[in-house]
């Protein structure tokens, strides 16, 4: 009788472990920023400064676009991290 | 251990409320029967069985209460995840809008600059002629290459 009571008592004291079955999806990245940066253009053989300047201008634009993309990624990560951590 | 609890958990919750009531009733009956002649011999087994049933029912009641608490927590988390997903989508929209707007500004600036160069091309080209080496140097700067061109 004492043994049965002891088993019941031990069973009652057994700790419960639980894992909450809540599924979370990894946030999607906006398609427009999820592309690699374009490589810089090369200047074609010429002796005209104006033609060189056009290519340099294009490359400045590409560089700025790439900078904006990196900035957008940083912003995306920062904001999404805040949202992720808001779930407790 | 969890298999036993799972099997017992298949029973509806009200069964365990009844079992708890019966267990307590059996313990009380055992105590009462002790005072009644002839039947007093059954009081100890009834009390013991009553105590065991009460313990089992209490254990299951605890399980039911814990499960209810966890289900509540799961529902709360699911709600939070839903809100977070909506917020996440909103953040994406804002980031994409800002990015696209800025890209359009860069594109406009490029077009304006190219037009300005084209309009002043004659003047620019009259003053300055480019040596072929300049093109090579400039193109090398635009490439990712291990050759730095530095002579030792």
Image (cartoon, rainbow, N blue to C red):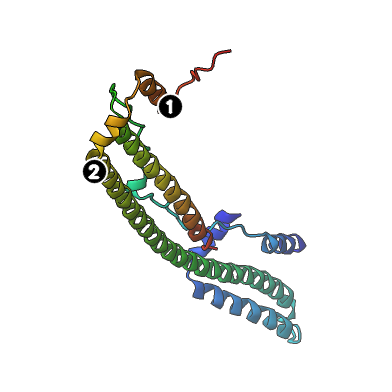
- Label 2: how many Cα within 10 Å (few below 14, some 14–19, many 20+): few
Q: Are marks 2 and 1 on the same chain?
A: yes
Of the 4 image quadrants, the one containing the C terminus of chain B is top right
Query: Measured from the top left, where is residue B129 in percent x and y?
Result: 32, 25
Chain bearing tag 2 is: B
In this orientation, does residue A51 appear? no
**Residue where numbered disc 1 is placed:** B141
Q: Residue placed farthest to the front in the image?
A: B127
Tag shown at residue B115:
2
Q: Earlier in the sequence, mark 2 or mark 1?
A: 2
Determine which quarter of the picture holds residue B133: top left
The N terminus of chain B: image quadrant = bottom right
Residue at the spot x=24%, y=43% of the render? B115
B27 relative to B18 in the view: left or right: right
* Disc nearest the viewer among 2 and 1: 2
Question: With A83 as the anchor, is A9 left or right in this view?
Answer: right
Name the residue at 71% across, 75% down: B47
**Residue B74 appears in view:** yes
Kindly identify which chain the residue marked by label 1 belongs to.
B
């Amino acid at each position: 009788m004492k043994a049965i009571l002891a088993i019941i008592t031990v069973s009652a004291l057994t700790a419960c472990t639980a894992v909450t079955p809540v599924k979370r999806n990894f946030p999607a990245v906006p398609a427009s920023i999820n592309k690699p940066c374009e490589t810089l253009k090369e200047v074609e053989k010429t002796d005209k400064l104006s033609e060189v300047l056009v290519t340099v201008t294009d490359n400045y634009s590409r560089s700025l676009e790439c900078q904006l993309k990196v900035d957008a990624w940083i912003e995306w990560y920062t904001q999404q991290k805040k949202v992720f951590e808001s779930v407790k | 251990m969890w298999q036993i609890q799972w099997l017992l958990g298949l029973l509806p919750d009200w069964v365990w409320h009844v079992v708890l009531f019966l267990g307590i009733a059996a313990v009380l009956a055992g105590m009462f029967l002790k005072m009644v002649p002839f039947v007093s011999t059954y009081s100890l087994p009834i009390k013991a069985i009553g105590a065991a049933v009460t313990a089992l029912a209490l254990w299951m009641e605890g399980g039911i209460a814990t499960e209810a608490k966890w289900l509540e927590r799961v529902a709360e988390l699911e709600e939070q995840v839903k809100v977070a997903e909506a917020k996440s989508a909103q953040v994406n929209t804002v980031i994409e809008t800002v990015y696209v707007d800025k890209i359009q500004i860069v594109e406009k600036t490029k077009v304006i600059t190219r037009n300005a160069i084209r309009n002043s091309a004659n003047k620019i080209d009259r003053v300055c002629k480019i040596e072929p080496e300049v093109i090579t140097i400039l193109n090398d700067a635009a490439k990712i290459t291990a050759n730095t061109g530095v002579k030792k």
